[in-house]
Amino acid sequence: MQENERFNNWKFPEIEEGKLTKYNWVVQNKDGLDLGYKSDIGAFCYINAKYGVIIEDYVQLGSHCSIYTISTIDNKQGSVHLKENCKIGSHSTIMPNVTVGKNSIVGANSLVLKDIPDNVIAFGVPAKVIRRLDE
């Protein structure tokens, strides 16, 4: 894993229920959030962790992303798992019962309704796998 200089002094952020962090993102149901080492969550992200959100090490979320473990529109609920080193583009939305695989990239403005496997690029509304990263 390549170290990025901006993370040399990385520390776990202080998270208060429903309040902006010093990095300007917010978590509801903070006890359901498992935040990994050197994760990078962009400004104005929203995380609802009522049914559990796991963000593994080195995950990056662009600004204005939303993660939902409950949807009042279609009554779905379930955990969200962002695996190690995955990257979620700005303004993307991750819905309940979704896992984004290790090293995968989700393009900006995507709506992720189902699992994204390891080592792929996916984007769109809804997000679809476009290609494997090893191609």
Image: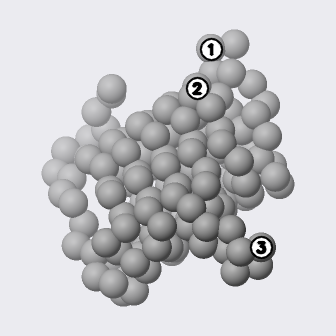
Q: Secondary structure at mark 1?
A: loop
Q: CA separation, marks 1 and 2?
A: 7 Å
Q: Height in image: 105 above or below 68?
A: above
Please state the horizontal and vertical placement of residue 16, each as a whole percent of the image. 28, 82
Residue 84's disc number: none
Labels 1 and 2 touching (C-beta < 8 A): yes
Foreground pick, 23 / 17: 17
Q: Earlier in the sequence, mark 1 or mark 2?
A: 2
Foreground pick, 90 / 96: 96
Q: Which residue ends up furthest to the right in the rendered image?
A: 125
Labels 3 and 2 touching (C-beta < 8 A): no
**Amino acid at the residue labelled 1:** Asp
Report crowding for label 1: few under 14, some 14 to 19, many 20 or more residues within 10 A (C-alpha). Answer: few
Quadrant including the C terminus: top right
Q: Earlier in the sequence, mark 3 or mark 2?
A: 3
**Amino acid at the residue labelled 2:** Asn
Q: Circle 3 sits on which residue?
A: 74
Residue 134's disc number: 1
Please state the horizontal and vertical placement of residue 124, each as a whole percent of the image. 80, 49
- Residue depicted at 76% across the width and 34% down the height: 129
Q: Circle 2 sits on which residue?
A: 119
